[in-house]
Image (cartoon, rainbow, N blue to C red):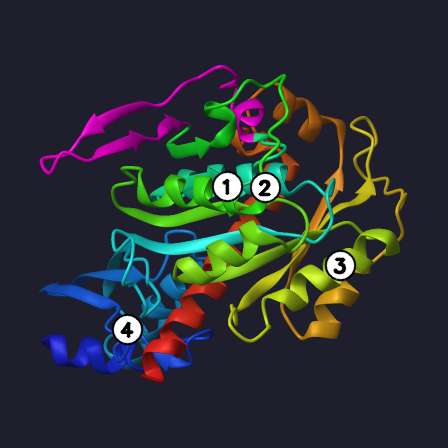
Amino acid sequence: MIITEEQVLAALSHVEDPDLKKDLVTLNMIKDVKIEDKKLFFTLELTTPACPMKDMLKNACINAVKHFVNAEAEVEINITSRVTKPMDTSQLKAIKNIVLISSGKGGVGKSTVASNLAVTLAADGAKVGLIDADIYGPSVPIMFDLVGAKPSAKETEDGKTLILPIEKYGIKLLSLGFFSDPDQPVPWRGPMASNAIKQLFNDADWGELDYLLIDLPPGTGDIHITICQSFPIAGAVIVTTPQQVALADTRKGLAMFGMPGINIPVLGVIENMAYFTPEELPDNKYYLFGKDGGKELAQRFEVPFLGEIPLVQGITEAGDQGAPISLQTTHPQAISFKEIAGKIAQQISIHNVQQMANC
């Protein structure tokens, strides 16, 4: 029996993306179908390289072809990605998705989480940038072993000078810590701090990025409002620890994104330092700060719970040494960050596709 492209596409129309609720053919995710006798070749173009369901979708495609076309078909699938973006891209058009890493509480590990998520997304093949927007306590220079580093600059054809982000581990990085003395405080009032943050967006040569992660400072102040109202934000990720004293502030930080004039989708909640696990006893869990606080927060606000990150010595040491633990791809905590990064990318794709469908 001769296999036709029409038969292949008809078969693949039975495979539905469980998040986007449409079949792969309708979503235009099937590309470059080629047929040689019983051998089939096509490309499956996902909405993110960090898709957590890529293996499931691949197997579903193979099964659909064998069931609806020919049981003896030899199916070879090339998996690629084209990251989606929000409809509002009037500014920073080369940056597809700006993602806020936020919490109303300081000391919950936002910088650690942001750094490891950036490393993970870059390792999956995404083009990633990271802005350290914590003016008063920038941590990115430490997390990436770049204390004392200074970005260079270039002049454009129209005479404008642009900052060149520092690149490390495949990530483009900017922090106010690159421009200030690490031993000196930054006594800036809100407007000055907000203007400095805008420069990290507007006066930098970011090039093309799939994801630009923003490590926000604690609280719900001028910097948060400036970023939310000045740039098209794909969504916010909330980081908390389980104890009530952290959750009290984090609830306010989460609620801020739903306020009139801000209205940014919350992609989910990460519970950091969820439990303590000694390196030598990896199966033991000690809930030092309480249990399930982040999960209950997500349920209360009806947003996804993205996962737990334990308090382990290895994460702390890796950050202090300037090599986030996600660089150790087989480490259990690196695997946890990879799963969470996949869920975040998944939520971004869902929101972007829904937004396009509603336009």
Identify which amino acid the numbered label 3 is placed on. Gly
One can see residue 3 in this view: no
Q: Nearer the viewer, residue 264 or 271?
A: 264
Identify which amino acid the numbered label 2 is placed on. Arg
- Would you identify the image quadrant in which residue 266 lies? bottom right
Check the picture and name the quadrant holding the N terminus: bottom left
Residue depth check, mark 4 versus mark 1: number of the one nearer the observer: 1
User: Which numbered disc flags the more N-terminal residue, 3 or 1?
Assistant: 1
Residue 118: give x, y in percent of width and height.
48, 41
Query: In percent of the image, x 69 and y 73: which residue is there?
Result: 301
User: Which numbered disc flags the more N-terminal residue, 3 or 4?
Assistant: 4
Q: Are marks 3 and 4 in contact (CB under 8 Å)?
A: no
Q: Nearer the viewer, residue 125 or 35?
A: 125
Residue 176: give x, y in percent of width and height.
49, 31
Q: Are marks 2 and 1 in contact (CB under 8 Å)?
A: yes
User: Which numbered disc flags the more N-terminal residue, 4 or 1?
Assistant: 4
Name the residue beneath numbered marker 3: 294
How far apart marks 3 and 2 lie (CA) works out to 32 Å
Q: Nearer the viewer, residue 342 or 134?
A: 134
Name the residue beneath numbered marker 2: 189
Name the residue beneath numbered marker 4: 65
How far apart marks 2 and 4 lie (CA) works out to 62 Å
Check the picture and name the quadrant holding the C terminus: bottom left
Identify which amino acid the numbered label 4 is placed on. Val
How far apart marks 2 and 1 lie (CA) works out to 6 Å
SS category of the residue bearing label 4: helix
